Structure formats: C-alpha cells, structure tokens
C-alpha cells in the first residue's frame, strides 16, 4: 500500500511539472518542441480511439463520430503526451527518493 501511495504522489508531482513545462514551452515560443511532444502521444491516442467503442467516445466527448474528429484526436494526443512525460518524471522521482 505504501508503494502505491508513493507512486501516485510521484505521478501527481510529475503531472504538475509536465503541465508547468508545457506552459513554459508555450510562453517561450518553443512550438517545435510542443509539436514533438504531441507527436509522441499520437500513436497511443490513435490506438485508444481505435480500440474503444465509438459509443464510449461519443458519450465522453458529446461529439458525434468522435474518433474521426480532429479536435478530439489532438486533445487526446496532448493528454497522452502529458501522461507519458509525467510517468517518466514519476519514475525518476521514485528512483531518486525511494530506491537510493
């Protein structure tokens, strides 16, 4: 139970830092890096859109044919990319603080 709580705390910290990093990149005008971040989340986002049923995505987003909507695809890619970077940061924090 302690490992799960520590892991969730590290992931939450990683998620906050990932969001702050994204804001910093936006204010710094580094849109090439933001595009690369979005490109890293694109494959897993497309996989989620393909594997989960259309009724799920329509109910979640309120958009008809959400799997083919470019706005939904872009937002899902951003969420996946932020989750990936948060997970990498969380693994680093966990290793730094609890596995030393």
Image (cartoon, grey):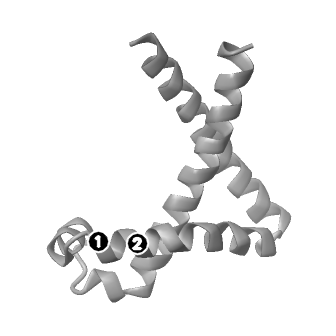
Q: Say which residue label 1 marks.
A: 51
Circle on res. 47: 2
Tag 2: Cα neighbours inside 10 Å, few (<14), some, or many (≥20)? few
Q: Position of residue 19 (x, y in %)?
A: 63, 49
Q: Quadrant of residue 41?
A: bottom right
Q: In the rendering, at what x and y percent does residue 76 appear?
A: 45, 68
Disc 2 secondary structure class: helix
Residue at position x 54%, y 65% from top?
78
Along the viewing direction, whichever of 33 and 96 lies nearer the viewer: 96
Q: Quadrant of the N terminus?
A: top left
| Picture disc at residue 43 | none
Residue extending farthest front: 99
Q: Is the C terminus in the top left, top right, bottom left or bottom right quadrant? A: top right
Q: Residue at x 25, y 69 (%)?
A: 52
Q: Total marks drawn?
A: 2
Q: Quadrant of residue 31?
A: bottom right
Secondary structure at numbered mark 1: helix
Residue 12 relative to residue 31: left or right: left
Tell me the residue at 50%/76% (across/down): 74
Q: Residues within 10 Å of mark 1 (few under 14, many from 20)?
A: few
Tag 2 and tag 1, C-beta contact below 8 Å: yes
Q: CA distance from mark 2 to mark 1?
A: 6 Å
Does residue 92 sit above or below 88 in this rendering? Answer: above
User: Who is closer to the viewer here, 88 or 18?
Assistant: 88
Left or right placement of residue 43 versus residue 86 in this view: left
Q: Position of residue 22 (x, y in %)?
A: 69, 56
Q: Image height check: is 55 above or below 86?
A: below
For image coordinates 24% across by 86% down, the residue present is 65
User: Where residue 59 appears, x then y in whole percent?
Assistant: 17, 69
């Amino acid at each position: 139970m302690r490992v799960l709580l520590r892991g969730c705390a590290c992931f939450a910290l990683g998620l906050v830092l990932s969001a702050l990093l994204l804001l910093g990149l936006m204010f710094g005008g580094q849109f090439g890096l933001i595009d690369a971040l979005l490109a890293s989340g694109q494959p897993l986002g497309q996989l989620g859109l393909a594997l989960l049923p259309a009724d799920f995505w329509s109910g979640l987003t309120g958009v008809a044919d959400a799997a083919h909507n470019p706005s939904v695809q872009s937002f899902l890619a951003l969420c996946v990319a932020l989750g990936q970077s948060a997970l990498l940061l969380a693994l680093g924090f966990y290793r730094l603080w609890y596995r030393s």
